[in-house]
Image: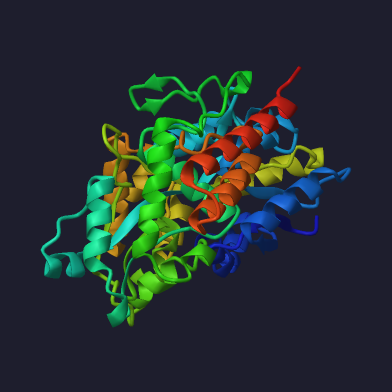
């Protein structure tokens, strides 16, 4: 009744879904009403919706780090309550993306986009300067320095450095690049073990020797960045890269359409895709981001079966291929990434598949614990003060550690 109501993030992939609405309406046999918000407003709306007696949305898009908190707070419905999980063909999803949809061994959403954050770099500029693609953090700094030429309107690198959520994500990923998870996770073959997060028996690990290396790395990166770097967030870091005024940028694959599909962009057909260059002794990591699509826990019972069928359609291999053919550069399934039609559209799919097989796609850099949003915010505030020169790196680490410890102490089950 009233059609299908979907709440999503306002990014290129979900906008492609919106453009294909008529096609999907024919497939599922009803009207689709889609609302899209920025990341912080999406979270607020999801929490607000959970407080209602009955959800006004049938399907909601959830950022991967929110899964644990939304599961614990009863905002998301465990999928095994609504459907047979085997119908999804779980082994077809990128391993890290599928694991990140789980909390306490149960799936709470279906990967709609698995979008690692990579290093985008201009292959032509690197070739002209005689530089090799950077594998280490030191290589990256050397390349950024060599290509930084503000007098001629070009800067070395762009990244998420705006205060709060944006920089907070960068901090967690930079720490991961130096082999330091944000929590005291046990090492395993793929990096670090996240299987027992549901026990809530973890401590924050920000103020550590590797944390200091990451903080000093970000401080150094600042020297080769655009002058407005401290207000740059998700899209702002990609725009100058697409325009040719920066030589490298950290960015999610979902942002690649901004230059891959723009005929006027100097970065078009000249971009290489790499996992994050690593600090000394650390493994290469491509931190996994993206969204799962799930069912609100307060969805009216009579709407659940139809919502499940729509979820199956939106996350199917056929739909994922359709998104890519219409401009998306994210993909959650191995079968789609290996499709010759998809591979022809962008080198990004072959690169990401190779990273997945090499075990470089990892979601432990942003573990989906209930407190992760506050921890990201704290890091984004303290490290912003550090980058502005208000406090030194050691002080930023100490303050962030103390504030994050306090959050964990408040929220840990008694």
Query: Which residue corresponds to the image point at 57% horizontal and 50% vertical from the top-left?
Result: 380
Counting labels gives 0
The residue nearer to you, when weighing 20 against 95, is 95
Q: Position of residue 405 (x, y in %)?
A: 64, 30
The residue nearer to you, when weighing 384 against 354, is 384
The answer to whether residue 261 of the structure is visible from this angle is no
Q: Position of residue 240 (x, y in %)?
A: 40, 73
Q: Residue furthest left?
A: 130
Query: Which residue corresponds to the image point at 30% horizontal and 33% vertical from the top-left?
Result: 282
Q: Quadrant of residue 154?
A: bottom left
Q: Quadrant of the C terminus?
A: top right
* Rendered view: 315 above or below 405: below
Q: Position of residue 144 (x, y in %)?
A: 27, 61
231 sits to left or right of 60: left
Q: Quadrant of residue 359?
A: top left
* Rendered view: 338 above or below 403: below
The answer to whether residue 12 of the structure is visible from this angle is yes
Its colouring scheme is rainbow
Q: Position of residue 107 (x, y in %)?
A: 58, 31
Query: Which residue corresponds to the image point at 80% horizontal and 55% vertical from the top-left?
Result: 1
Query: Which residue corresponds to the image point at 28% horizontal and 81% vertical from the top-left?
Result: 152
288 sits to left or right of 11: left
Q: Quadrant of residue 181?
A: top left
The residue nearer to you, when weighing 150 against 370, is 150
């Amino acid at each position: 009744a009233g059609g299908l109501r979907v709440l999503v993030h306002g990014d290129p992939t979900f906008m492609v879904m919106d453009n294909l609405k008529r096609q999907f309406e024919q497939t599922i046999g009803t009207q689709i009403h889609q609302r899209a918000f920025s990341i912080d407003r999406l979270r607020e709306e999801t929490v607000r919706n959970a407080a209602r007696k009955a959800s006004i949305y049938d399907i909601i898009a959830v950022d991967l780090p929110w899964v644990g908190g939304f599961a614990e707070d009863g905002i998301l419905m465990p999928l095994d309550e609504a459907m047979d999980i085997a119908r999804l063909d779980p082994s077809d999803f990128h391993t890290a993306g599928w694991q990140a949809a789980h909390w306490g061994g149960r799936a709470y959403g279906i990967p709609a986009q698995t979008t690692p954050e990579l290093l985008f770099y201009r292959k032509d500029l690197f070739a002209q300067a005689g530089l090799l693609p950077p594998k280490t953090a030191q290589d990256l700094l050397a390349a950024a320095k060599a290509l930084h030429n503000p007098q001629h309107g070009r800067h070395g690198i762009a990244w998420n450095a705006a205060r709060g959520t944006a920089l907070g994500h960068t901090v967690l990923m930079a720490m991961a690049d130096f082999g330091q998870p944000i929590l005291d996770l046990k090492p395993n073959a793929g990096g670090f073990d996240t299987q027992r997060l549901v026990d809530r028996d973890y401590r924050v690990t920000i103020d550590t020797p590797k944390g200091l290396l990451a903080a000093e790395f970000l401080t150094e990166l600042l020297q080769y960045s655009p002058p407005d770097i401290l207000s740059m967030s998700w899209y702002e870091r990609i725009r100058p890269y697409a325009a040719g005024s920066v030589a490298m940028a950290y960015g999610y694959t979902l942002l690649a359409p901004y230059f891959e599909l723009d005929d006027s962009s100097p970065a078009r057909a000249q971009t290489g895709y790499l996992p994050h260059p690593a600090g000394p002794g650390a493994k290469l990591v491509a931190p996994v981001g993206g969204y799962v699509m799930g069912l609100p826990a307060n969805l009216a019972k009579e709407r659940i079966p139809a919502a499940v069928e729509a979820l199956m359609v939106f996350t199917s291999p056929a739909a994922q291929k359709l998104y890519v053919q219409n401009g998306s550069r994210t993909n959650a399934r191995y079968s789609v990434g290996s499709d010759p039609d998809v591979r022809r559209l962008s080198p990004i799919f072959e690169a990401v598949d190779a990273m997945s097989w090499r075990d470089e796609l990892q979601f432990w850099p942003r573990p989906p614990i209930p407190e992760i949003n506050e921890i990201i915010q704290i890091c984004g505030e303290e490290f912003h003060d550090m980058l502005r020169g208000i406090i030194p790196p050691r002080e930023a680490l100490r303050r962030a550690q103390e504030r994050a410890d306090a959050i964990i102490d408040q929220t840990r089950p008694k």
